[in-house]
Amino acid sequence: MFRNKEVRDFTIKYILGLIICGIALYFIIKSYINNIDLIYHQEIINSDSNYTSLLETGRISHSPAQYSQEIRQLRTELFVMCYVIFLIIGSLGYILGLRLYLIPMKAIATVRDNSQNVLEGVYQPPDFSNMTEGDISQFYSMYTKMVTAIKQSKDKEAKEKIFLQDLIADISHQLKTPLATLTIYQDLLCNPNVSETKKQEMLSLMGGQLSRMEWLILSLLKLARLESGAIEFSIKKQPLLPTIQLAVQNVSMLSDAKKQTIDVSCHPDIILPHDRDWLAEALTNILKNATEYAPMESTIEVSVEQSHVMTLINVKDYGIGIDQEAQSKIFKRFYRAKSEVNENSIGIGLSLSKGIVEGQGGDITVQSQIGKYTCFTLNFYNK
């Protein structure tokens, strides 16, 4: 125990304090004895009688010689008794003081050892459940919160690192095909034997590949910002109908090309706290997906239901449907169904829509039956 520097310092200081108190006690007792002696002799001095008369009358019980001997004996007994009591109290005080002193020292040692584990990557704070209320327990509580915060920060950093690695790998994989196509077209354009008509055709195809690459990069950047929490939505209480109309307008060229009708059923008075631009983009991706899977001259239904509890936005098409296995995967980044009708699809639109909806406090689900319909539902709980 005394190998501990703090305990050793405490013991030295305590012993020095006891010595000082012992010296002070010695002078106090000596002063008390001398005061008694002075009173005795002063009484004799003030009396007109001699020692014999005083003894005979009972005014004093001892002669000066006997009294001095009694004083010496009393002084010895008093010193012994006082110092025995003093040492007992001092020992008990030392034990109690050392016990109280070791409580914060134990807390510091526990935190020190655990801090070393934290530095080594073991984020497991000690069990402080048996601690009583007080400053030490509050210190333990704050330390536990600090370790938990560090662990969460490290976990988040590790997830972001993995996400960044996956994102770079996904971008590299997705850009590989259009880049290879552009390289082939560029080599063909350098061939002098290629006709002017063929060159124009290849330039048009190259433009399409470049547009696809631009859309892919922009979508990936949006998805990365959503998943990293870097986007702050400007959520306002506003009518939902104009947001839906904006999304319908964004896919009007695609629906018109297939002679499809987008039927919107939303009461103008329905108010929903949301970010109009971002929610319109989420709906645009879902509507784009619907136009691709729905047959020619079909109807795509967009309906809104609102209750005291939640607001539901349903986007339903009567196309080929999605099988049960694919329904649990379609919101994953770069997932493409086996029945994909668009060869240029890269499987990022629905993942982006999911991130936008969840970022605004909602969630998105899908129901589908093969060959009958597919319905995406955006759920927003009313606050």
Image: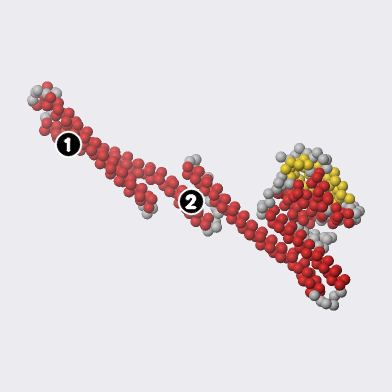
**Circle 2 SS class:** helix
Residue type at mark 1 is Arg
The residue depicted at 81 percent of the width and 76 percent of the height is 191
Query: Which one is in front, 345 or 251?
Result: 251
Name of the residue lying farthest toward the top: 57
Where is residue 51? Give x, y as percent.
Answer: 9, 26
Q: Quadrant of residue 155?
A: bottom right
Query: Which one is in front, 184 or 14?
Result: 184
User: In this rendering, does residue 46 appear at all?
Assistant: yes
Where is residue 115? Give x, y as percent.
Answer: 50, 54
Q: How many marks?
A: 2
Q: Position of 110 compared to 378: left or right?
A: left
**Circle 1 SS class:** helix
The residue depicted at 87 percent of the width and 47 percent of the height is 263
Q: Which residue is mark 1?
A: 72
Query: Which one is in front, 235 or 200?
Result: 200
Q: Are marks 2 and 1 in contact (CB under 8 Å)?
A: no
Q: Which residue is mark 2?
A: 111
Q: Tell me the distance, in whole angstroms, between the alpha carbons under discs 2 and 1.
A: 57 Å
**Residue 333 higher or lower than 132, as above or below:** below
Residue type at mark 2 is Val
Where is residue 378? Give x, y as percent.
Answer: 77, 47
Q: Nearer the viewer, mark 2 or mark 1?
A: 2
Q: Position of 280 compared to 66: left or right?
A: right
